[in-house]
Amino acid sequence: MQLTLLHRLYLAAILLFALPVSGLAQDADTDDEEAADDSAPVAVEEPLELETQTVTGSRLATGDPTARVYSITAEDIKRLGVSNVEELMRTLPWTYSSITQQTSAIDSSVLAPSDVDKNPRFVDNASTGLILFEVITGFGTSTANLRALGSGNTLVLVNGRRIAGRAGDEEGFANLLNVPLSAIERVDIQLDGGSAVYGADAIGGVINFITKRNYTGAAVTLRQDFSSTDADRTNASIQGGYGWGSGQITATVQQTSQDPISNAKTGWTTNDFSSLFGPEFDDRSTTIGQPGVARRICTYSWGQWPCGSMLQLPAGHSGEGTTADDFTSDIIPIDYVPPQNGEDATNTSLTLFVEQYLSDDFQVFADFLYSEHEAYQEYRTQLTGYTVPASNAFNPFGQAVQVNYLPTAEVNAGLLPGAYHESKNEQRNINAGFIWNFADDHQLEFQAVRSRSENFGWQVDYVRPNWLSDFDPTKARLEELLASSDPAVAINLFGDGSRQSPHLGELASPFIGPHRGSTEKDTYELLARGEFFRLPGGPISYAVGTQMSTKRISLEQEDQSDESPGTVTKGLEVLLGLENPEEDLTAFFAEFALPIVGEGNARPGLQALILNVQARYDRYEAIGAIGGIDYVRNEHGRRVRGPDGFWATEGEPNIVGVKQSHTSPRIGLHYKPTENLALRASWSESFRPPVFSDIFHVREPFEDTVYVQDPYDVPGGPFCLVFGCQVRRQSIYAVGDDLNPESSDTYSLSFDWTPDSVPGLRWSVHWSKVDFTDKIEYSYNLIFTDPEEVFLLPQFVERDSDGNAIRVFPRQINLSEKISEILTTELEYSFTSAWGAFRPGISYMRTLDEYFTIIEGAEPIHRAGTIWGSNDYELVGSLAWTAGRFGADLFVRYTPSYENDRTGTCLTVIGRCERRFQPRPTMKVDSYVTVDLTVSYRFDNGLQLRGGGRNVLDADPPATPWGGRPYDLARYDARGQVLFVEANWEL
């Protein structure tokens, strides 16, 4: 990383921007003698005390005392020692780290299922040619997932406003990498829903990032992370602000650069995990290698398919001058560990807030956020499924064979560029409006918000010819090189790479891309709030208003075409019937706080009693296709491929409109029997409407043949292969308004107690339960994630009289329910001594229940304490200490043991694996303890130094198989031990 250049740029910016402002800021502290000097700067006039406030979980100016909102301040964030928002989310006991920088580029088949987070939507890319949403837009993404209810059910706000979700992704969840940590003044987390205030997507909870504002002066911060796994990170930020008598401006600029994780330094050096977990866990590959692994191709009535034994030349054989007898079926296992995980990334962001009072009662304001995140990652380079004709100079079999080849020697020699993935994500939010205070106790607020996210990506890999369009010039050249009988020209996929064609590098082509995605969201909101009729306990507060918004998504990729200029752009019209699907929202909301008991009528045992009532009505309208497109079939009823290599189709999309509405109520109660004890109780209802692909699809219902693993298979049924048995699949993609919105009921109880008898003691307890019903799921996903349950349900699997599965029914469905019940308690005690001020604390979060049922009456599928669920509990001990200029914060985090019931699939018959492709044995994962430490020292001149680290004792993760790795990335941060130094200078 070019640290010197980066620091020079920031120093120049400080000199140009910060020094004049710092002179003004310092002038506020000058004494009378300095103020009398004519050469001294003019003193700053203090702005009006009418600053804009952001509250979470309420539209009342003073907030909702019946809501339990956890707040993390900018100072708390510094104490935690984290360097970006993703790391901040990892410290919260209620989050499940399902989509992070370390998992978003991993094959989605190893990630959590849809009830825990977003699983890939089924896209018929064999006919559409459109790659899955997640594959296109997923790299360079990090999300928040509260209570393991899914990123799409966790509403992320910036300054109380929605932002455009991940670019081109219909789910709409925010990318946390586009939220700059240095710009955050406070983070609020509400676990009790939030749809009564914010509308959809708040089933799991709300996270509200409030950016810095009303700052006068300048500050610069530099931070350097040193990771034990090479994932170093550099953060640099500048904050400046200036106030005048009737307004103020605050701006923050941040730049971050980071290196990827070296997998070898995490302890992942082999794929043979048999010494750790047993003989069933040797994950070395015997289907690919160098020399290449070949299989003969056989012709059947339905087409051609590889058959017979896998064959390979001995190690060190060049592949030149061979005969078929030189090959052996004793395949050399390939122990390939990818060199990197995470991202080689840079991030630049800017936040700006400005407000101006045109009078004592009228204020205009605007805030702006811009963020750009660029990410790059190298991954495994391989040539799989290549058909090598009999004419190939190195093919000794006298017939076409299929070869899987690992070109490690060629990549190392520079003959073949390595495969890589890169992306660029941009986020732009602007929010502008006015506040008018009138009639003493009333306020009218208008806001207009425009938010846009964009993604550009490119994934370079090596694609076999039958995956390429006939119009792709790479295809013809690749077929020519594979068929060549000239040893000086032909590609050699049989040897060890020492005798290779100089033309091998011509195979490079974009596997995905270039692709572009965008999401736009325009919102207009009018809000009136204030106070009216007084009760004995005080005035009634109210907030009423309306909101209108429009969301548009776009997703494009370039494919080869016979049309000029040789490429064609393909978008969502091939899936949803429209290039830019659009969703319109109209909402009306109201909130009232009734102080039944307050200061005026308090009595012993009843100091305060407040009733809060909220309701919001949302009406959604969307347009898309429900059928209209069908496959072209030949005289035998079989599908026909078009010249682009995909299944040919005919017909026109049937475009229709779908409307859905929902009313979300909430009732909360705040009761204080004494001044030191506060109790809260609430009930609320939240919802989430179906996304575009839940209800729209251009494809008509159709039937085809697939192979599935039936855990209850009986002998003598349909034709079976080692990876599954043959069944008919009846697919319905477009269901229209037959699908209900997802909804939930949330119940909450909490209290806070600060007893007079023990000054400095604070104890809080919070219980909440989410009863999540009508969860939308693509039923075909469940066949693979939870086959033991699904194959017992006749709604999804049809069996013949002998009990054999003969037909499956993929379609979007509403699941019966998912339950999340948690209890969080925090205890801390503040005291002072001759050694300074101390604040020890302990936080405990217990998952009381977490399960889902597919249909009513079905057996529940429990997630708590498993690899695809929340931990049984989270325990964090902390100690804060300050003494004069010194400070220190210590955190000890304990993760209990849990069950890994998703250890993978048996690759061979060995040990406890009685057949191939059956699930491997379940195992218990050990508990895990990490220690975080931050120390600080403040100088008189405004400079503060911090240092410390996360996982300072460099604790190794508990071993368990997870997505081909020996550790669980949802619970372990593979950056390992991260030590840091930070300098913050308030100028």
Image (spheres, rainbow, N blue to C red):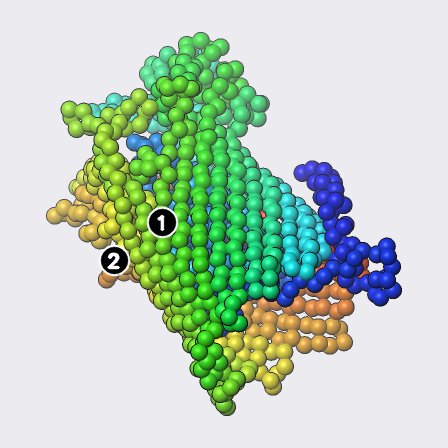
Q: Residue at x 46, y 25 (%)?
A: 509
Q: Name the residue under label 1.
A: 584
Left or right: 161 with respect to 294?
Answer: right
Is residue 272 something that shows in the picture? no
Q: Residue at x 58, y 23 (%)?
A: 413
In x, y percent, where is residue 322?
Answer: 43, 15
Q: Nearer the viewer, residue 897 or 912?
A: 897
Which picture quadrant has residue 562?
A: top left
In x, y percent, where is residue 230?
Answer: 63, 43
Q: Residue at x 50, y 30 (%)?
A: 419
Q: In this view, does 501 lie above or below 714?
A: above
Residue density around tag 1, few if under 14, some if 14–19, many if 20 or more, within 10 Å:
some
Q: Which of 296 and 683 is in front in this view?
A: 683
Left or right: 365 with respect to 857?
Answer: right
Q: Residue at x 69, y 52 (%)?
A: 240
Residue ranking furthest to the top: 486
Is residue 544 something that shows in the picture? yes
Q: Is residue 254 above or below residue 882?
A: above
Asked if the residues shown at circle 2 and circle 1 are in contact, with their CB atoms under 8 angstroms apart, the answer is no
- Numbered badge on residue 855: 2
Left or right: 608 with respect to 250?
Answer: left
Quadrant of the snapshot with the N terminus: top right
Residue density around tag 2, few if under 14, some if 14–19, many if 20 or more, within 10 Å:
some
- Residue type at the position of mark 1: Asp
- Numbered badge on residue 669: none
Q: Earlier in the sequence, mark 2 or mark 1?
A: 1
Quadrant of the snapshot with the C terminus: bottom right
- Residue type at the position of mark 2: Ile
In x, y percent, where is residue 479?
Answer: 39, 16
Distance between the alpha carbons at the discs numbered 2 and 1:
31 Å
In x, y percent, where is residue 155?
Answer: 45, 56
Q: Is residue 963 above or below residue 193?
A: above
